[in-house]
Image (tube, rainbow, N blue to C red):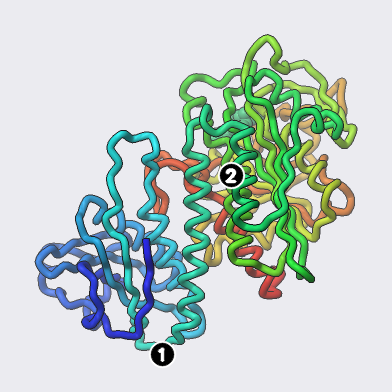
């Protein structure tokens, strides 16, 4: 999709289709030229409601407000509504909630690209994307005078963010026998090459030398050997150093504690955290942000077989802590334990964030739409919450640690067990397990984001079609951008 910005009034812009956003059911606005027809047809302008007037080539869509959080999903619905149509070009006005902030414009462009996404790599007949070009008139809803340069920056940033989110979606949506650890590593190398990033791939031999025995145990029964990926964006005089770590389970069968058939389907999405890291690194390189960003991915497949690790095994993690395995389906925390230790050994960071589809309990607790954010200190957790809920278009909520739940991870024979002895609070106990692998320097600089809910979409919502959502990409990019602008939290 190509985006143009124009000083021209919408009437003078070429475009087969005009898209009009009806804000807060206000049909009296000058942008709405078919008020009577819309009323007669029963179009009420509810959030995400669309109406295509074929005679006048106008597509109307309702948005509850002019904030990006409403405009983004609204315009995504508009994209879905014209999916089968043959319009090749479209035009649209600019909408802003505030003359100084281009956030709504950015949200609009993100919504267009995220809403138009579909994963068709495995379809024999692909539904061609006909709409190729969208021209945005900088004539604004409130008649704000806009600077074309700042609008252009908002559009450019939106394109980078949405492309990286869709890139992450593609990786996650690809079946597990086409994206396995080695393939993730080759994707990382490609991202590095294109974005001028440093890239190191750690292979099994070296993982052994690094004492990453917890990660290796999870990987052992798979014919696909594991990889640890380290990408780095290192600008001169960085304002901060950020480490990202992602769970990259290219498949999670549950291992010997095998998942029931119905729960195993969609477990190709257990690589969502790692795939988000790859997408974020791609965007950070393109935006060339003045923040040093390190992206680590633990790419592993959790399978069964004669060589599989077992419940009752005791594993020694990289930091020397012993872990009693009580359930091989709680594998993400074992992979992340070693990955986090490795990341902290390699980089002393100002902030460290991990993203993982870690627990079903998080989905039960906070729903399908929201990530759970945990940590030992309010600063990094608040940074994530603010970046997510404010403008990114993603939702995140805080889950507090407490010492009583922490005790439920006690093991009789090792330093810690990999599952808790209670059914309750599973997202938090998983987070507390990870905190055991965060060193003194990083203790208060770390936050864990459980993206198990939003990472994979079973029924389309907001700007997310069926399949992978790219959860975490937009939140983390906002966070890094905010750091670059000197807003710590
Ligand atoms: N990958 C799953 C978590 C998950 C569940 C992600 C649903 C996305 C959707 C994770 O490895 C897992 O299996 N966790 C177990 C932990 C349990 C054994 C303590 C779970 O959530 O059931
Ligand atoms: Zn699992
Ligand atoms: Zn898993």
For residue 403, the mark is none
Q: Left or right: 333 with respect to 411?
A: left
Residue of label 2:
275
Quarter occupied by residue 94? bottom left
Estimate the x, y position of residue 226 in percent, counting from the top left: 69, 30
226 shown above or below 79: above
Q: CA distance from mark 1 to mark 2?
A: 40 Å
Q: Judge whether 129 appears above or below 287 on screen.
A: above
Query: Which residue occupies 72% across, 30% down?
Result: 420
**Picture coordinates of residue 238 (x, y %)?**
76, 68
Can you say whether 278 is above or below 21 in the image?
Answer: above
Is residue 331 left or right of 455 when viewed as pictured?
A: right
- Image location (x, y in percent) of residue 328: 68, 22
Looking at the rendering, the quadrant in which ligand 3 lies is: top right
- Counting every numbered tag in the picture gives 2
* Sequence-wise first label, 1 or 2: 1
Q: Position of residue 343 (x, y in %)?
A: 79, 46
Judge by depth and name the residue closer to the eye, 75 or 226.
226
- Secondary structure category for the residue under label 1: loop
When the figure is inspected, residue 93 is found, relative to residue 82, above or below; the finding is below
Secondary structure under tag 2 reads helix
Q: Residue at x 73, y 27 (%)?
A: 421
Disc 2: residue Cβ within 8 A of ligand 1's nearest atom: no
What residue is disc 1 on?
145
Residue 153 in sight: yes
> Which residue occupies 59% across, 27% down?
252
């Amino acid at each position: 999709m190509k985006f143009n910005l124009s000083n021209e009034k919408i009437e003078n812009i070429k475009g087969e289709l005009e898209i009009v956003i009806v804000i807060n059911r206000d049909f009296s606005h000058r942008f709405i030229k078919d008020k009577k027809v819309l009323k007669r047809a029963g179009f009420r302008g509810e959030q995400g409601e669309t109406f295509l007037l074929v005679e006048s080539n106008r597509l109307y869509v309702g948005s509850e407000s002019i904030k990006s959080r409403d405009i983004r999903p609204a315009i995504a619905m508009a994209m879905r509504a014209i999916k089968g149509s043959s319009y090749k070009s479209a035009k649209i006005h600019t909408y802003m909630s505030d003359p100084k902030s281009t956030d709504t414009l950015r949200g609009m462009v993100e919504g267009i690209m995220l809403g138009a996404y579909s994963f068709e790599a495995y379809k024999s007949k692909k539904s061609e994307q006909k709409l190729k070009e969208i021209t945005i008139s900088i004539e604004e809803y409130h008649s704000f005078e806009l600077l074309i340069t700042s609008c252009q920056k908002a559009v450019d940033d939106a394109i980078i963010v949405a492309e990286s989110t869709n890139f992450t979606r593609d990786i996650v949506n690809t079946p597990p026998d086409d994206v396995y650890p080695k393939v993730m590593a080759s994707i990382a190398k490609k991202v590095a090459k294109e974005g001028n990033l440093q890239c190191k791939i750690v292979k099994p031999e070296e993982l052994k030398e690094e004492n990453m025995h917890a990660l290796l145990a999870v990987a052992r029964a798979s014919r696909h050997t594991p990889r640890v990926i380290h990408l780095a964006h290192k600008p001169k005089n960085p304002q901060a150093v950020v480490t990202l770590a992602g769970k990259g389970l290219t498949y999670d069968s549950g291992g010997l504690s095998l998942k029931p058939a119905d729960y195993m389907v969609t477990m190709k999405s257990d690589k969502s955290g790692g795939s988000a890291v790859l997408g974020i690194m791609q965007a950070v390189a393109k935006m060339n942000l003045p923040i040093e960003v390190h992206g680590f991915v633990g790419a592993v497949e959790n399978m069964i077989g004669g060589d599989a690790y077992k419940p009752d095994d005791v594993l020694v993690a990289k930091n020397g802590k012993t872990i009693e395995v009580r359930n091989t389906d709680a594998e993400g925390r074992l992979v992340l334990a070693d990955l986090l230790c490795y990341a902290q050994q390699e980089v002393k960071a100002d902030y460290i964030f991990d993203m993982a589809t870690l627990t079903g309990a998080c989905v039960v607790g906070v729903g399908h739409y929201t990530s759970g954010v945990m940590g030992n200190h309010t600063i990094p957790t608040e940074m994530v919450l603010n970046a997510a809920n404010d403008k990114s278009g993603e939702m995140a909520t805080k889950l507090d640690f407490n010492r009583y739940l922490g005790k439920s991870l006690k093991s009789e024979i090792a330093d810690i067990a990999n599952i808790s002895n209670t059914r309750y609070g599973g997202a938090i106990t998983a987070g507390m397990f990870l905190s055991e692998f965060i060193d003194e320097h990083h203790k208060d600089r770390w936050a864990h984001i459980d993206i198990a809910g939003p990472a994979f979409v079973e029924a389309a919502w907001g700007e997310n079609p069926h399949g992978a959502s790219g959860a975490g990409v937009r939140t983390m990019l906002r966070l890094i951008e905010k750091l670059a602008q000197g807003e710590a939290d």
